[in-house]
Image: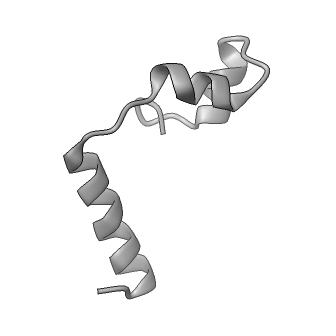
Amino acid sequence: MIMGENPKIVSDRMGHSRVETKLGIYSHSNEEMQKNTVDRFEEKFGLN
């Protein structure tokens, strides 16, 4: 997600033909985001 929005829609709105372009330029992650994702996956898929 980019600022909570679907990357494909953001990419389309910005005129990028490929979502990879948008993700490569504008998306970033940090340690807290990484941990939150791991926590959600563990909860959803019972990986803990």
Residue 3 placed where, x, y %?
40, 30
The residue sitting at the top extreme is 15
Q: Nearer the viewer, residue 26 or 43?
A: 26
Q: How is the image coloured?
A: one colour
Residue 45 relative to residue 40: left or right:
right
The residue under the point 40% across, 71% down is: 41
Q: Is residue 41 above or below residue 30?
A: below
The residue sitting at the right extreme is 17
Q: Nearer the viewer, residue 44 or 26?
A: 26
Q: Is residue 45 above or below residue 33?
A: below
- The quadrant the C terminus occupies is bottom left
Residue 32 relative to residue 34: left or right:
left
The residue under the point 72% across, 21% down is: 12
The residue under the point 65% across, 23% down is: 21
How many numbered discs, if any? 0
Residue 45 placed where, x, y %?
45, 83
Residue 31 placed where, x, y %?
21, 47
Residue 29 placed where, x, y %?
33, 38
The residue sitting at the front extreme is 24
The residue under the point 42% across, 78% down is: 44
Image quadrant where residue 17 sits: top right
